Image (spheres, rainbow, N blue to C red):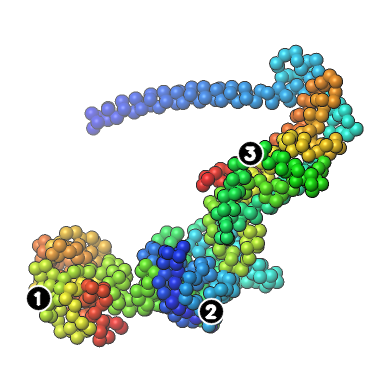
Amino acid sequence: MAQVQLKNLEKTYNNTNKVVHGLNLDVHDGEFMVLVGPSGCAKSTTLRMIAGLEEITAGDIIIGGQRVNDLSPSKRQIAMVFQNYALYPHMKVRGNLSFGLRIAGRPKAEIAAAVDNVAAILEIEPLLDRLPKQLSGGQAQRVALGRALIKNPGVFLFDEPLSNLDAKLRASMRVRITDLHRQLKADGSSPTVVYVTHDQTEAMTMGDRICVMQAGHIMQVATPKELYNAPANLFVAGFIGTPEMNLIDGAMEGGEFVMGGQRLALGGELHGRLSNQPNQAVLGIRPQQFSLVSEGPALRAKLVNAEFMGHEVYMHTDCEGHRLISVVGAAEFEARAESDVVRLRPDPKTIHIFDKSDGRNVSLHGGSSIAA
Amino acid sequence: MTDIHLPTTSIRITDEAAAAKRARMDLISSVVRYALLFGVGFLMLYPLIWLVGASFKTNSEIFSGAGFLPQSPTVEGYVQGWQTSTPYTFGRFFWNSFLIILPKVIGTAISCTMVAYAFARFDFPFKKILFGSVIAVLLLPNVVTRIPQYILFRDLGWLDSFLPLWVPSALAGDAFFVFMLVQFLRSLPTDMEEAARVDGANSLQTLVFIVVPMLGPALVSVCLFQFMWTMNDFLGPLIYISSVDKYPVSLALKLSIDTTEAFEWNRILAMSVLTITPALVVFFAAQRYFIEGISAGGRKG
């Protein structure tokens, strides 16, 4: 059992600078939880508090049913992978992997077996007698992973482990880490993972659940699918998804969304989902959920720029002074009427309405069709 | 085609001419530069070269000219100088120096590392005041503390022993080294130490297994400085050591000056050469780490 619970967790620096504001989070046993948010949202601080590298100002951290606030890092059944690997520069890879076990005074034979085992899993056997400075970024990353793995911890903590790698390597390490987690789960050790990243692609592809944070607050905790389809508020809506969701200021009047000189009829289906009808509202539409139409209710926008991405086109358009990005199929784009003005129809099932006053998504109510 | 071709050729020709001219200028400038550097370097090294040369001269030849090549080289100065005018050979004085230097260097390395580690990595009450006083000690002229120190060591009964010469340093008494190591530590990332903590190492284990190896270059500089300064220290032994059998080499050199009626300069010079040899050898052996340590420590200073 290595469940991680944060209860009203707070962190204040120098008695004045509060960076973590009462976090409550339950990470289930064996779950891959990703903490994601822009830089400065205190996700790393939170992780370091879980690791025991940062003192807790208030609240509790419970790992595997035990309150660990006052325990040293080594007694918390955790292992951590650092952003810049933090390999011991003067020890060979073998020494790096075995350091924890040697400190714990385990028998030599056991240490050697554990090193060989981990090296085999991560395919780093040929590197065992090298120094960290003789490793490439990807290799160093695998050694850092091995150093965590060898301890067979209940909880793995990752602090932006892939941010120093190039894009291609990052993609392959991403798969490697999730594969490893799956494999460990299949073997029955069921390790819990808390993974910090600022990269939403990593978050979306790796996490069982994602905890989106901003300025020391949790904005939403949900599965990747739910975050994408049913963002709880403006922040999550804008943060998750590429290109970003279009967020348009306007007003709700009757069944229509009014922006500038245009009115968009939202249809009965959306109305059924609204929990309240804010006056001042923000309309949220994902770029992928526009279609080019020649007639019917749609937003008229002026085409400013078109980025050709292969099978699809990113259209940058100007709609009543708002910049709208839409992703349409290349064929659809080619087939449009030869005109600067395009008509974009959002899929009413996937439209979100946010209350401008507090940023809450008011279109989730009864929205089972989109919450999936 | 041709009218395009022609100008390019002429451009190439001027290019080549310019390149040749540049190469010639480069050559001249480096010849001048090296000649100048060599000249100034020789000028600065001359006293040292003369010292080595003169130690092989006879007493009468030393003052006959400023040249450094001995006309009839002799090791007489070394042989007689080594014997000294005391019952002891110079070997005894080297041994005395060694007995001071060894505990002092080792003690300095250990104590300063621990103190610097504490200042650089831990928060404890009055840390700022304590570190401020370390810096204050750094700025305090040595002369000011001479007399109180002397009285203290006299009361401890340490006079005419090696203890006053190395014990203060072995207890991190040299603020300069503490400061230097603190600066070096501050420039090192803390991730490795955090990784070690997660791996289960306590503070002392982290210090010994992780921090000290990373501190290597800075520690080499500390040891070298301490070695050379102790080897060259004259005032300390002069104040605290009174019996000849405990003299370190720095005092022994002076001994050969004032106990003989006529100065045997060749002996003095020969022993001077021997005296600076250990420092030179150690310095050149550890030069690479030494420079690394100083520059890395200074970068963030």
Circle 3: element type? loop
Tell me the crowding category of disc 3: few under 14, some 14 to 19, or many 20 or more residues within 10 angstroms, Cα based.
Answer: few
Dividing the picture into quarters, in which one does residue A167 lie? bottom left
Residue at horizontal 74%, vertical 38%? B236
Circle 1: element type? loop
What residue would you read off at disc 3?
B141
Residue at horizontal 43%, vertical 61%? A163
Q: Are marks 3 and 2 in contact (CB under 8 Å)?
A: no
The answer to whether residue A114 is left or right of residue A248 is: right
Q: Nearer the viewer, residue B136 or A239?
A: B136
Instruction: Say what amino acid the circle numbered 3 marks.
Output: Pro
Q: How many marks?
A: 3
What residue would you read off at disc 2?
A67
Q: Are marks 1 and 3 on the same chain?
A: no
Number of the front mark, 3 or 2 = 3
Q: Are marks 1 and 2 in contact (CB under 8 Å)?
A: no
Q: CA distance from mark 1 to mark 2?
A: 60 Å
What residue would you read off at disc 1?
A296
Q: Are marks 3 and 2 on the same chain?
A: no
